Amino acid sequence: MKHFIVLAVLMLCSVGFFAGCDGMASSFPERRRRIKNANEIYARQMIDDLDQIFLYDRVCYLTEWPIRDTDD
C-alpha cells in the first residue's frame, strides 16, 4: 500500500511538471515569453563574446606591422 501511495504522489507531481501548468506568479504564455527573452539575450551575449575572442571589435595589436582600423 505504501508503494501505491508513493507512486500516486510521484505521478501527480510529474503531471504538473510535464504538462506545464500555470504557476501562481505567471501564466504559461508569460513564462514562455520570459524564457524566449532570456535565450535572445544569451544569443546576443554569445555574439559579443565571439567578436571579442576573434578580435573583430577592435584593432589587432599582435603583429609588428601597423594595421589600420577598417571601420573608417
Image: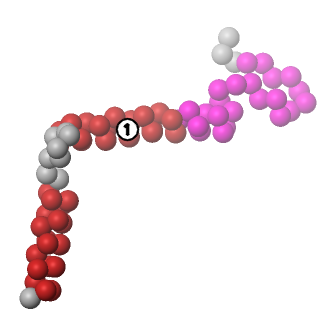
Dot 1: within a 10 Å radius of its alpha carbon, few (fewer than 14), some, or many (20 or more) residues?
A: few
Q: Is residue 12 left or right of residue 44?
A: left
The image quadrant of residue 3 is bottom left
Q: Which residue is mark 1?
A: 38
Query: Number of numbered discs present?
Result: 1
Specify whether residue 62 is painted magenta.
yes
Residue 53 found in image quarter: top right
**54 sits to left or right of 2:** right
Q: Who's the residue at 83% across and 34% down the image?
A: 62
Please name the predominant secondary structure of the magenta segment in the image.
Answer: loop
Position of the C terminus, as image quadrant, is: top right
Q: Nearer the viewer, residue 36 or 10?
A: 10
- How far across and how far down the image is residue 42, in percent? 45, 39
Between residues 50 and 2, which one lies in front from this camera angle? 2
Residue sticking out furthest to the top: 72
The type of residue carrying mark 1 is Ala
Instruction: Give the residues in magenta.
Output: 47-69
Q: How is the image coloured?
A: secondary structure
The quarter in which the N terminus is drawn is: bottom left
Furthest residue in direction front, as rendered: 2
The residue tagged with tag 1: helix, strand or loop? Answer: helix
- The quadrant where residue 41 appears: top left
Identify which residue, 28 or 6, lies in the foreground.
Answer: 6
User: Residue 13: x, y in percent?
Assistant: 17, 65
Q: Position of residue 16 (x, y in %)?
A: 15, 59
Looking at this view, is 49 or 54 the one in front? 49
Residue at point 17%, 53% (across, down): 20
Residue 52 part of the magenta segment: yes
Where is residue 8? Give x, y as percent: 10, 75
Residue found farthest to the right: 64
Q: Is residue 31 above or below residue 4?
A: above
Q: Residue at x 17, y 72 (%)?
A: 10
